[in-house]
Image (cartoon, rainbow, N blue to C red):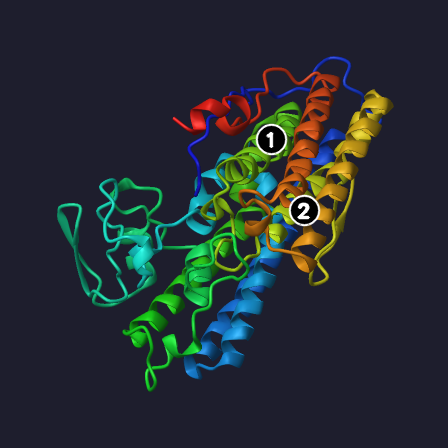
Amino acid sequence: MKKTLLLATTLAGIALLPAGLARAADAAAVLDTYGDIAEAAFAESVATAEDLSAAVDALIAKPSDETLAAARKAWLAARRPYQQTEVYRFGNAIVDDWEGKVNAWPLDEGLIDYVDAGYGSDNPENAFYTANVIANPKIMAGGREIDATEITPALLSEELQEAGEIEANVATGYHAVEFLLWGQDLNGTDKGAGNRPATDFDTANCTGGNCERRAAYLKAATELLLSDLKEMADAWKDGGAARAELAEKGEAGGLATILTGMGSLSYGELAGERMKLGLMLHDPEEEHDCFSDNTHMSHYDDVMGIRNVWFGRYEGFAGKSVEGASLRDLVAAKDAAVAEEVTAKLDATLAAFEALRERAETVEAYDQMIGEGNDEGNAVVQAAIDTLIDQTRSIERAVATLGLDQIAFEGSDSLDNPGAVFQ
């Protein structure tokens, strides 16, 4: 789920580079590269979402094990470029304000569709906990009636997303589509992901009931995901709103934005909310891609996104690669030792996440790694967390090297106040 996080930064109104900032590497060129990487990565997010949309259409037209597998494969491919854009969230308000539409998690899936009895029938904190819009054309919850007779993108985004002002009511985005393609993962920390049958979309041989409405929801959610991604891809084109917002901050403000994204994703978001919290609780519900068991790749691509903006390089998935002036070079012009330190720490983090990825692909899924009593799996996850924390300290040194004051990275109770997690 998209957390409500506070950024203690003062970027507005900074227009000039601090005195003494080296000009050997051009800060303006670094910011251009940063924008170009965003443009390429969001463009590829759109392209892969278009492939996903086509696969969903094929599934709906002819539900089968083969078309369901193809749609799942397309979803997995679509996640990769998108996850590498998450480093743009923190510090770029236009991205962070938008992000909840496409990547909010975790979700109370009973809002959308049928669930296992173990899910429970009600939640005193969420009137929409088992609303099941797919089964119910009319929903009465939270003191109001919602007309869901026709399942459309507008219904999902305007009526159901965060219904009742509850963040767990996630009706849109990657994870709503993921749930519809895989179904609930009922394995806990045992082996296995969600296992929704293709016949859940087959109106002639329907399982799960309401197959026509389920297909309509999947279609609407996929269309909405694609349109939301196009909105952000356009924002990062030349003359787009995100480019304009970045330019208005000036060079120092823009550099602070890059480093805020790197540090906040490294520390509070990835190391804390997405990894340490789930490890502390040993709770598979706290893994990011919980229905598909794709969490290891989502984490890996977050790490790659941080590297992209440091090295000024994006290796595209469909030929949209970018390489240009880098933040690393800018820091090196001021203090080569600090630049080398950050690079070494990022390399150590990548190695730790490659080990985590290899284990997920050959030994056990991420939700099994964080299970209680799995000392070896827990240690692999903790080692990756430790490298993220370590690299954050070096990113802080890069901030100081560039003379960029008053930047605070996102925090997390799981790292900063662990006792609060169990209260």
In this rendered view, identify the residue nearer to me: 280 or 216. 280
Please state, as top left, top right, bottom left or bottom right, where the N terminus lies in the image: top left
Q: Quadrant of residue 216?
A: bottom left
Q: Residue 261 location in percent, x, y?
A: 60, 33
Q: Residue 266: x and y, percent?
A: 63, 34
Q: Residue furthest top?
A: 19
> Foreground residue, 157 or 194?
194
Please name the amino acid that badge 2 sits on. Ile
Q: Would you say 24 lies left or right of 150 here?
A: right
Residue 139 point in image, percent of width and height: 18, 58
Q: Amino acid at mark 1?
A: Tyr
Q: Which residue is mark 1?
A: 267
Comparing labels 1 and 2, the label whose residue is closer to the camera: 1
Which one is nearer the viewer's eye here, 361 or 45? 361
Q: Quadrant of the C terminus?
A: top left
**Marks 1 and 2, Cα distance to the nearest angstrom?**
22 Å
Q: Tell me: 138 left or right of 390.
A: left
Given the current orientation, which residue lies at the most extreme bottom position?
Answer: 204
| Residue 29 spot, x, y in % from top left | 74, 36
Which residue is at a point 46% across and 26% down the rendered structure image?
A: 6
Q: Which residue is mark 2?
A: 37
Label count reads 2
Give the residue furthest to the front.
373
Q: Residues within 10 Å of mark 1 (few under 14, many from 20)?
A: many
- Label 1 vs 2, first from the N-terminus: 2
For image coordinates 24% across by 53% down, the residue present is 121
Asked if 87 appears above or below 80 in the picture, the reply is above
Picture residue at 85% right of the left edge, 23% below the top = 337
Disc 1 on helix, strand or loop? helix
Would you say the residues marked 1 and 2 are in contact, meaning their CB atoms lie under 8 Å apart? no
Residue 272 in sight here: yes
